[in-house]
């Protein structure tokens, strides 16, 4: 496998026809057809660590695109400032998120070399938004990395104006992979267990993995929450999962 890639900042059409910033990485491997992945950034925003994840997908053979969900809130601001502005507004409205991700999916499907299959992955608040997107759009595979507020509302003190979306489970359009930490509180293991139970009721294909000794943000290599063993195993599960559902 060649790890040569091209990465650049582009503009895509998002919710309500708005032009928004996005980060695109594509493999330079000459493949005739490949799957694509939309990366939904975590609550800290459209930052360098999440752009590195976009490049990681491209290095492994996928076209990958991350829309800047906070672009309207603070265009041109640093990731920290944009995230603070978005949090002060209560986060990204669900309708706007779906519109932005829909635009990202359209862009990826139109790329030269696309096989038409598009998956989504999200971290933290992006994990919830990955589930939301997969219940709102026709996608081929979804990954939820420790996304909270799917089953339970935000706890007091968490500045998010969102509600539970477990009621959308019947509309899940694709297989779902969930990667969680046993020591996490948002979401806690009882919340992910309840989501799994509801998905079972509707016969929705999913596989959830909960890692002992890991809490929230265990994929984040630049944080003290990073847990290499859980993250490495989680990445292998992501490659296996997308290999089944996004490969040509």
Image (spheres, rainbow, N blue to C red):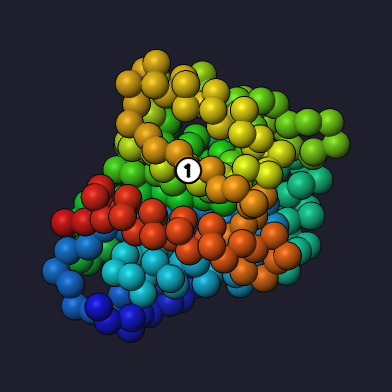
Question: Can I make out residue 12 in this image?
Answer: no
Within 10 Å of disc 1 (Cα), the crowding (few <14, some 14-19, many 20+) is: some
Seen in the picture, residue 88 relative to 52 is either above or below; the reply is above
Q: Position of residue 196 (x, y in %)?
A: 47, 27
For image coordinates 57% across by 56% down, the residue present is 41
Residue occupying the far front of the picture? 212
Residue occupying the far right of the picture? 157
Residue 197 or 7: which is nearer the viewer?
197
Task: Name the quadrant containing residue 206.
Answer: top left
For image coordinates 32% across by 50% down, the residue present is 241
For image coordinates 81% across by 45% down, the residue present is 88
Q: Position of residue 45 (x, y in %)?
A: 66, 58
For image coordinates 71% across by 39% down, the residue present is 185
Task: Name the quadrant containing residue 56.
Answer: bottom left
Seen in the picture, residue 204 relative to 224 is either above or below; the reply is above
Q: Position of residue 117 (x, y in %)?
A: 25, 50
Q: Position of residue 242 (x, y in %)?
A: 31, 53
Residue occupying the far top of the picture? 201
Residue 21 or 26: which is nearer the viewer?
26
**Quadrant of the frame with the C terminus:** bottom left
Which residue is label 1 attached to? 209
**Quadrant of the frame with the N terminus:** bottom left
Residue 130 or 208: which is nearer the viewer?
208
The kind of secondary structure element at disc 1 is strand
Please state the total of marks drawn on the protein image: 1
Question: Can I make out residue 123 in this image?
Answer: yes
């Amino acid at each position: 496998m060649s790890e040569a890639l091209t990465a650049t900042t582009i503009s895509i059409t998002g919710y309500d026809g708005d032009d928004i910033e996005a980060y695109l990485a594509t493999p330079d491997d000459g493949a005739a057809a490949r799957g694509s992945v939309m990366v939904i950034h975590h609550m800290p925003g459209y930052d360098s660590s999440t752009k590195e994840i976009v490049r990681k997908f491209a290095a492994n053979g996928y076209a990958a695109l991350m829309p800047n969900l906070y672009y309207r809130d603070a265009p041109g601001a640093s990731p920290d400032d944009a995230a603070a502005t978005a949090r002060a507004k209560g986060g990204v409205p669900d309708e706007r998120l779906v519109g932005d991700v829909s635009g990202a999916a359209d862009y990826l499907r139109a790329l030269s070399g696309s096989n038409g299959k598009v998956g989504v992955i999200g971290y933290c608040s992006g994990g919830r938004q990955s589930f939301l997107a997969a219940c709102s759009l026709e996608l081929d595979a979804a990954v939820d990395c420790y996304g909270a507020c799917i089953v339970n509302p935000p706890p007091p003190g968490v500045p998010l104006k969102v509600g539970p979306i477990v009621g959308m489970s019947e509309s899940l359009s694709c297989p779902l992979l969930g990667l969680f930490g046993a020591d996490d509180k948002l979401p806690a293991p009882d919340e992910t267990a309840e989501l799994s139970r509801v998905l079972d009721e509707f016969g929705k294909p999913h596989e959830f993995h909960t890692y002992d000794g890991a809490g929230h943000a265990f994929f984040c290599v630049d944080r003290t929450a990073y847990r290499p063993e859980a993250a490495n195993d989680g990445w292998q599960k992501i490659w296996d999962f997308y290999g089944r559902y996004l490969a040509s």
